[in-house]
């Protein structure tokens, strides 16, 4: 089954990046401006949006410096996945866990210049899985600059850390299991398909949050 994806257009640079979610982890396709690896897929936590976050939900293996980025980064910023050095499973800060390395390889695996990621940390079973290519859907679901809509779509696709961070401890929840709030969230996500800057697709919305 083709992998659904959306496109995020940065209101700062105008660059467009594909984004998708695999096994609870969001990934974006790099432009190469910062990484030097255009076309490569990297894991991230979420976009810096406008909603209050519950920093207590940050996983233990994440770098605590992420809180600084979540608090001070510009609204359009992509919050990269930063894992504590003692918890990293690879030699790459861009792909710090084996599952992120495997997912990146399955989504493409190399930058446009042909640089292949180091697979020496993978066992034979993991290497075979990494060769099982993931094919993106023919069309993206929508293209948007709205960071909150992007984050909500990621959550509805199963992005675990974004979901937990968006469950604010304050009385005014942005995302929780309250039925009324879920209806508001679904309307917000649905509106993104009809937004003046969005490109709609007839593909179904997959809701994986229980």
Image (cartoon, rainbow, N blue to C red):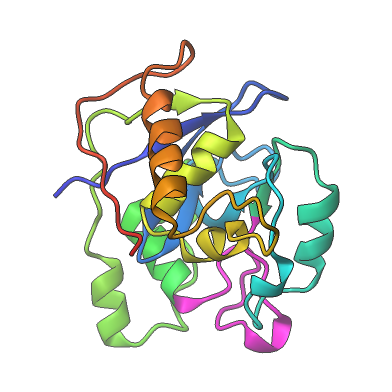
Query: Which residue is drawn at the image coordinates 43% and 26% (left, top)?
Result: 192
Q: Residue furthest top?
A: 196
Above/below status of 140 relative to 85: above
Is residue 88 found left or right of 156 in the rendered image? right
Q: Residue furthest left?
A: 1
- The answer to whether any part of residue 110 appears in the image is no
The stretch of residues the image draws in magenta is 80-98
To which quarter of the image does residue 165 belong?
bottom right
Above/below status of 210 relative to 200: below
**Closer to the camera, 100 or 63?**
63
The chief SS type of the magenta part is loop
To which quarter of the image does residue 203 belong?
top left
Above/below status of 83 relative to 167: below
Q: Quadrant of the C terminus?
A: bottom left
**Closer to the camera, 192 or 145?**
192
Residue 152: % across, % down: 48, 44
Query: Which residue is drawn at the image coordinates 58% and 48% (left, top)?
Result: 174
To which quarter of the image does residue 11 belong?
top right
Tally of numbered tags: 0
Q: Is residue 89 magenta?
A: yes
């Amino acid at each position: 089954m083709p992998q659904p994806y959306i496109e995020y257009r940065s209101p700062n640079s105008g660059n467009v990046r594909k984004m998708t979610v695999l096994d609870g982890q969001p990934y974006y396709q790099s432009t190469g401006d910062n990484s030097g690896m255009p076309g490569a897929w990297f894991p991230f936590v979420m976009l810096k949006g406008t909603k209050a976050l519950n920093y207590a939900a940050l996983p233990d293996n994440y770098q605590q410096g992420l809180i600084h980025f979540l608090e001070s980064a510009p609204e359009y910023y992509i919050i990269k996945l930063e894992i504590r050095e003692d918890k990293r499973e690879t030699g790459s800060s861009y792909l710090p866990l084996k599952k992120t390395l495997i997912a990146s390889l399955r989504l493409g695996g190399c930058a446009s210049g042909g640089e292949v990621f180091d697979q020496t940390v993978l066992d034979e079973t993991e290497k075979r899985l990494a060769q099982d290519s993931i094919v993106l859907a023919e069309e993206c679901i929508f293209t948007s600059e709205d960071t909150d809509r992007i984050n909500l779509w990621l959550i509805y696709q199963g992005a675990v850390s974004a979901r937990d961070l968006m469950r604010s401890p304050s009385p005014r929840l942005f995302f929780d299991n309250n039925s009324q709030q879920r209806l508001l969230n679904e309307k917000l996500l649905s509106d993104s398909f009809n937004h003046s800057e969005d490109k709609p697709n007839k593909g179904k919305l997959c809701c994986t949050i229980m």
